[in-house]
Amino acid sequence: MPAEVLRDPLALKLSLPGETTAVIEIGDLPNLRLAADLTEGLAASVHPHGPLGKRTTVNAFAYTLRRMVRELAEDGFEGSAAELTRAALGAFWLRSHYLVEYRTRTLLRAFDTRHQVLAEPVRQMVFGTNYTRPVVGEPLPPYAPAEWNRLIDLCKREVRRLAEEHRAMVTLAESGQDPAIGGWSEANGAWLMLRTGPVTRTEVAAHLGITPNVFTKRHRGIERVRAALFPSHKEAVPYVLLLAAWTGVVPDGLTGLEIPGIRWIGKQATLLSYTKGRTGQESLVLSPRASRLLEQWLQHSALLRGHVPDELAEHVWLVTRQGRPARAAFEEYTMRGWVRSHDLRGDDGGLLRIDRRRLRTTFIAQRGQRQWSLRATIDPNHSPQVEGDHYLSAATPAQKAVVEEIARDAQGDLLRRASAPLVVDEAASAAGLPEEVHRLGLAEGALAELLSGQRDVFSGACVDHFAGLHGPKGKPCPARPWVCLLCPLALFAPRHLPNLLRLKAFFARQFRQMPRDQFAAVFAPYARRLSADILPRFEKAAIAAAQLDVGDGDAELPLRAEETTS
């Protein structure tokens, strides 16, 4: 386990990837037994045994650990993790937000995996489904034009300045000599670092044969020489921000760039391969200015790349951390420090908050303005209305007639869906039936045939079975039974109640076996019309009597083979 107990037995030192450490102190907590168990779970969750690899993440887990111990102590719990109950744990999680529950579940799972001490009901709860869900925020807005321009201009100036200082320091190193012979100076220090890589004060003092304290008192400028020759996190920030703004590569893909993923195509184009966390490997052809920027960074970091171990040599973003080569991480605190050092302000007057995801959002938004719009297929300067009026209109009178007929059919369909269904009991009692007969254009005597059942289909009396809306005129309507529920030619009488109830049972079976989205697209309009508009217009006694004749199987319906799996 990457952990060791310090002199104080109530503290734990965790070794993290990248030669960093995190110290977890629990001596001031009210329940030391629970705190010790959770701390052990935290240690077991650190890479390579668990998912935690960053110091900021470990510190966040430690903060949540302390919060859990304190809140459970306020609730009266004083035992160890093995004595946790479902009630105590459930009450804590129900009043916590998603991250608190996620982190404490992770700690308890890791601890129980090692010792198997949780009670079985508690274990099922810990390894079960989260009570809370992460809150999905609003889409990130692009940067305002003024903020974007200030950021890009600053990055360009910094890249130019850093490149000039790097070239000047390399030139100065050519005039230097070994400081052990010629004494310390910036030129001699640059000469030494060109050959040995980034060195610390202690290493330079040892090379000169003096103590570090004497070197610190007598000599200055080692940090400036090292920063000019070998970029640090601070010097890498403008490069990565500018490359993100010019390519739109996702932050994790940009941070994880490797040298084998860069292929130079000609003099100005570059094929960049990177890993996107959600989708895997992707590639992008860089623009000329992005290619030049990437090439400039590789030249800037070439000296450092020659003095790093093999496991770091293939990473693009190599920097120095405390005088040692390391892989750049571009954490949020690094961005905050860089913004503060350059006093970069937003439109609100405060320090500009840099979110590399917003750089991608802004890149996409600007690309939609510069290049062809997805909604404009002829000219990106035209609105959709202009495109439709000038380029998508019918070219001939025949085509125009077809388009207009399609529009009329669509409008008629909307009107039919909005009209109320014709139910005999209600219409006959409301003296509105003659108007419906006139509206439907029925011939003399047709009303009597409808009411008597001479004109009838499965779920409704049809005005004219050979004039259906879903097939050729003069042929029997091919619509499926439930389509009659929305058909304007259908008249529903009490004799249809058993079949209507069979359709209702059919919808219920389909709802149980189909995905909700699919059911909503296929059956929802018909089920809603049946339950909300048609059945409530019949008497309850008639519905109850008809229900006696209804089973719960597809055999009751006149369905084709393919309709049983709709």
Image (cartoon, helix red, strand yellow):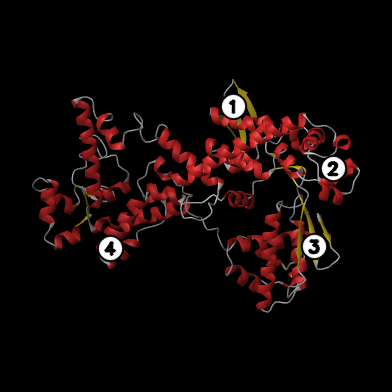
Residue 204 badge: 2
Give the Cα distance between marks 2 and 4.
92 Å
Residue 489 badge: none
Q: Earlier in the sequence, mark 1 or mark 4?
A: 1
Q: Earlier in the sequence, mark 3 or mark 4?
A: 3
For label 1, the SS is: strand
For label 2, the SS is: helix
- In-image side of 247 versus 6 (left or right): left
Give the Cα distance between marks 3 and 4.
70 Å
The residue that mark 4 highlights is 536
Q: Is residue 142 visible?
A: no
The residue that mark 1 highlights is 270
For label 4, the SS is: helix
Foreground of the two, 414 or 258: 258
The quarter of the image holding the C terminus is top left
Q: Amino acid at mark 1?
A: Thr
Residue 12 badge: 3
Res. 7 image quadrant: bottom right
Res. 473 image quadrant: top left
Q: Amino acid at mark 2?
A: Val
For label 3, the SS is: strand
Give the Cα distance between marks 1 and 4.
68 Å
Viewer-nearest of discs 2 and 3: 2
Q: Is residue 320 above or below residue 436?
A: above
Q: Amino acid at mark 3?
A: Leu
Q: Earlier in the sequence, mark 1 or mark 2?
A: 2
Local packing at callout 4 (Cα closer than 10 Å; few below 14, some 14-19, many 20+) is few
